[in-house]
Each structure stands twice: as structure tokens, then as C-alpha cells.
Amino acid sequence: PAIDGSGDEKKKKLRIAVIGGGWAGYSLCESISTNNLPTKCGSRGDIEIIMVDASKQAKGGLAGGYRDETKNNRPVEAGIHGFWREYRNTFNIMESIEGVDVDEVLGGFSPSVLYSKNGKVAVAPVLLDEDEQGSDSGFCVNKYGKMPVIKDVSEKSIRRYIAALLPPPLDLPLLAEIDNDTNGKKGDSKLSPIDLLSGLGLVGAWADFEQESRVSWERYDSQPASLLFEKAGITDALYEEMVSPLLHVLPMCPAYDCSAAAALSCFHVFALQSKGAFDVRWCRGSISEKIFDLWQRQLEQRGVSIRGGSRVASIEKNYDGKFNIRLDSMDEKTENSLIVNCDAVVLAVGAVAAGKLAASSPSLNSLDAARDFDKLRGITCVAVRLFLKPHPTVTTGLKGGLHEKTQLQPDFANAMIDSPIAVCGAGIGDIEELKETGFCIYDLQRMHDEFSVDYYEDHVDKEDQVAVLEIDFYRADSFVNCRNDEIVALALEAASSALGTASKIDQSTIVDSTVLRARNAVSHFAPNSALYSPGVKLHKGLYCCGDWVDRVGHASWSTEKSVVTARQAANALSADFGLTNSQCNVIPAVEDTPQLTALRNSAKFLRTISPVETLPPSPWVFAKQKLSRDG
């Protein structure tokens, strides 16, 4: 049967179907469901919104998570997701959810530790910490540009003072704690000053590449990031120790399979666009429970119908311009296959899912904007959560997390003394399966309230207490089809190899474990992928949003990009159908610093007098090439 209105009142309603229940889908519904709020005259709007998602929970999609069905009702997620400082639209939309206090849902900004295949590389501290608004990092400077003042003569204070006087990214080498061991002693640095200085070779391309310029994206997206780094002249050491690990956990792919535009955009958004851009906060528990449960309640109160366990088979356009959405699942209430009739459809799914929908929907595939969806690719991720017998020794005084205690075995705890987050590049431990796989390690006892040692003392019986370790793998195609026990064993080996612990965690200490596979679920920004990225409006009545949409638009990534494009799609839909009470204003990305603006102007001038067909080389690479030719 078809789901449509009955009675004159319902027939007048504009019906909108939203496919996908992640950040993009919920943000789209949030933006347009305000049309159903009571007006000053006391009446309500005339729209009906149906959101469908393939997962039974339909709360947060890939990011949401759920409770397992064991007697302990343990929370699991398909990966831990961070919230970066410049997630302006994301924080804004979270603040609009009744019952969500951002500062109670998220912990403070946390440092992270970067590991390469050769071991620990650096501690990435919180770059704009509480002290910059008045805490304890050694000097005072506020966000409005007040000059820093040194409060003591410690090395940390002096480095932060000098860094505060420099524009990003020149402040990063001073702030990063390069190659310290877990006892805080200086090790034999893998990165020399020359290696670090070679990173300046990227400044020319960074200035030349304008984040919201179609011309820039066309110029850089056709080239692999490997060519970008070669022309920049960065040293092999800097690439192996810092650039490559970041590529494997941010865009989640090696340089040859990542577009130069994506690499520049990703590094700009996550690290370089402003002071503190690399600073990240983490949810204090399950995103589904802390955010999406309350969000779903709010949307349902506005009349949004949310249907989990509903996988869309195809989208068909009727002769009257309306749409039929065919579901290949069964509705639990009616026990019948469903067809959703609607006036407008919003695709809030990943790129690969959108490609599959286009392939089965001639009315969608015939559109110019959707014709190349099949060329978009996805990255496979695997999330492993280990619930472990607590070690008799509670390790305390650990830094960087929401909580400072853990019941992980002491060698693991001490290896993660600086932060509960370890960011690991590919090739760790010469493990064949990890040749092109990056991963992150999380000590959730220091990040999630319900696992914290202090919470356990008052609320959890001793026999029910567990230490919780999560290992999330990116680009995990080489082992995604392995058995759960094989993947758990791989996770233990990977964590031990990365952290350099004397021993692996014994599998006999594992109380429970979960392995979640997300095949081709994360957007893959390969060379030329921006060519196939559509705008938010495919056609009147057909819209899309997600982190793979409108790559040349708003300078944002990941969750923030999903929220931004959802607001943009809501704006386009509202304009097409005359919705006047939508809340879909997009907060612009942070403005370029004066120094970057000057660099961009110089790059534009240089292109007018000496056009470069592809990517501009660094000055030293250009000089080397010229001397080679002259010789």
C-alpha cells in the first residue's frame, strides 16, 4: 500500500521524504520542521515530513550507535566521532535541541598523540586552550586579539607566547611536542628542523588553493596529493612521520588515492584555518543517547515521522511531478511493503548509497547532476570495542582526557599518559593488513562518563566493571570480511605495536567485544571526485546533502559539511515550495587571516604573470628544476 494523506486537510499538506537518518538527515528535518511550529496566530504549518533510514534505530546513522542486546546492555558505535573547534554550524544546531547542553554533552578540548609506523611522533596539544581565555598555559591572550602576556618563564610558556604572535600554520611546529616519550623526556627526534621547515613548501599551494573557488577545485582535484607533496619539496621524513599518518585518519586514504584539493581542504579545515582549528572535543558517551535521542523527540513533537529499518529500493517520478519512494523492507506496524508518496525527496545518504539509488531510479539517474553518482567511491571502516577485565592497579594522573584514571593494564595506560586518543598512520608494526590502513585508539574510561573509574565507585558493582578500549580502522578492505575473533586479534596486535607496549592485552581478559563493519560508508575524496559531487539541488523536488555534496562550496568537512549542506538543501527546498518559516541560515566558515589573505593575493598575482598549468612548486623545488634544466 501507499502511504499518503487521507481527508482534505492532509491532502493539502506538502509531503517531504528525507532518506537517511544521520547528521545530514536530522539537520534537514530540523531546518524545515520549524514550519510546523505554532505561529503568532496559533496555527501550524502545512508540511508533513517522513524520514526513513535503513538502520532499525534511525538515530544518527553511521555516527549514532546503539545498545547491544546482551544482559549488560553495552553501548556500541560504528566509530568515535570528534567535534572540531570550527564546527560552527554543528554546535549551533546542537544548541537548538531541547535538553542538549553542548558543554555537558561534550568534554573539553583534548590533545591527541600522533604515531607513525616508526613510533610516536608528537603530542598535538590543545592549541587554543582555556588559558587563551584565561587559564594556565603560561600566558593570557583573548580571542579578540589582545597581545599575549608571559606569566612564567617555562619552556611551554615561552613557546606558546611566540606561537601566539604567529599566524597559522607557522604556530604549529612551536606548539607540537615533537617526539617526547611517555615519561616526558626528549627522545632522538625523527624530525629535524630542516624536515619541519620543508613543510613551508606547501604554503604556496595552500595560498593558491581557495577553499570556496570552483576554479581552484578543478585545478587541484584532478591531481593526486602525492604530486602535491612532491612539488612542495617536503622531505621523506616529514611525509612518513606526519603527513602520511594524518592522511590515513582524516581523508582516510594514502596520498596517491587522495586528490590534492581534498588534502589541502582537509588540512586547512581541520588544522590551518584558524588558531586552534585542530582542537577537538569528544562526546561524553554515545552520540545516539546524548544527542540523537533528544533530537528525535524534538522532531517527532513537530510532526516528523521517523521510520527505522526502511531501506529505499528506488525513487520514481509520477506523471504529476510527485514522487514514489519504494521501500524494500516491511513496515512493522502494517506488515506490508510500502510506497511513500511525496512532493519532494531529499537524499541524506552517503555517496555510494546515492549511487545505488541512482542506478535503480531512472528518474534520478537521468538528471545531469546525478548521472555520475556511480563513479563516487566509499571507504570501508571497522570499529572494534573491547570490554576488558579491569586491572587490579588503577593508573591515575593521566593527562588530556575528561577523566584521569583507567583500569587498562598499566603498560597500556602509561603509554597513553598524554592523551586517551592515539592517532596512528598506516604500516604500523609491518602488519600486512595495515599496509594502507590508519586507525585510532581510544581509552573510553577517560572519555565516557559511564565507564569512568569514579562513576564505577558509586554506581557499578565491582563484578560488572570493565575497562573499555576502542580501535577504529579506516580503509579496512583487507580484513573487513575476516571473522570477528580474527579482527579482535588484529586490533590487539595493532594497538600494542603502535603504543610500543611490552605485551599485548591477553585475549582471556576480554569480557565482551563488538566488531562493527561499515563497508564503503565513508566518503572517499579520490582524484577527480569533486567533478561528480553535486550541488544541493538536483532538480525541483529533488535535493541532496552530506559531506560529499557541494565540495566547492562552504569550507567544511565531515559532520560540519553534512550540517551545512543540509541547511543549504533546506533553503533550496523552502524557496521552491514557498516555505517561509524554515531555519536554514548557514554560518560562514572562518575568514582567512590577514596573513593568508596577503598570501592569496600574492598567489593570484603570480598566476597572472606566470601561469602554472597544474600545481605550483615550492621555491626550492622550482630552483632545483631550473638549475637542472640550465645544467
Image: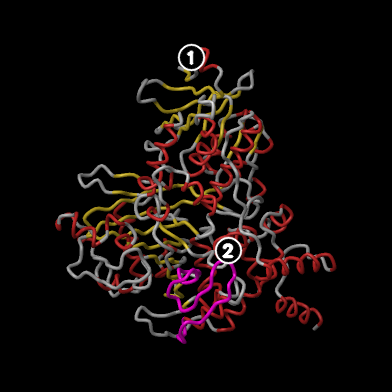
Disc 2 and disc 1: Cα gap in Å? Answer: 52 Å
Q: Secondary structure at mark 2?
A: helix
- Label 1 sits on residue: 6
Q: Amino acid at mark 2?
A: Phe
Image quarter hosting the C terminus: bottom right
| Residue 571: quadrant of the picture | top right
Residue extending farthest to the right is 609
| Residue 275: quadrant of the picture | bottom right
Magenta-colored span: 128-156
- Label 2 sits on residue: 267
Q: Crowding at label 1, few (<14), some or many (≥20) Cα neighbours within 10 Å?
A: few
Q: How is the image coloured?
A: secondary structure
Location of residue 609 with respect to 550 vertically, above or below? below
Instruction: Tell me residue 116's x, y (percent).
Output: 46, 71
Image quarter hosting the N terminus: top left
Indicate whether residue 193 is drawn in magenta. Answer: no
Q: Secondary structure at mark 1?
A: loop
Instruction: Tell me residue 425's x, y (percent).
Output: 46, 66
Instruction: Tell me residue 180's x, y (percent).
Output: 42, 80
Q: Please tell me which residue is depicted at 47% across the width and 42% down the height of the picture.
A: 22
From the image, state whether disc 2 or disc 1 is nearer to you: 1
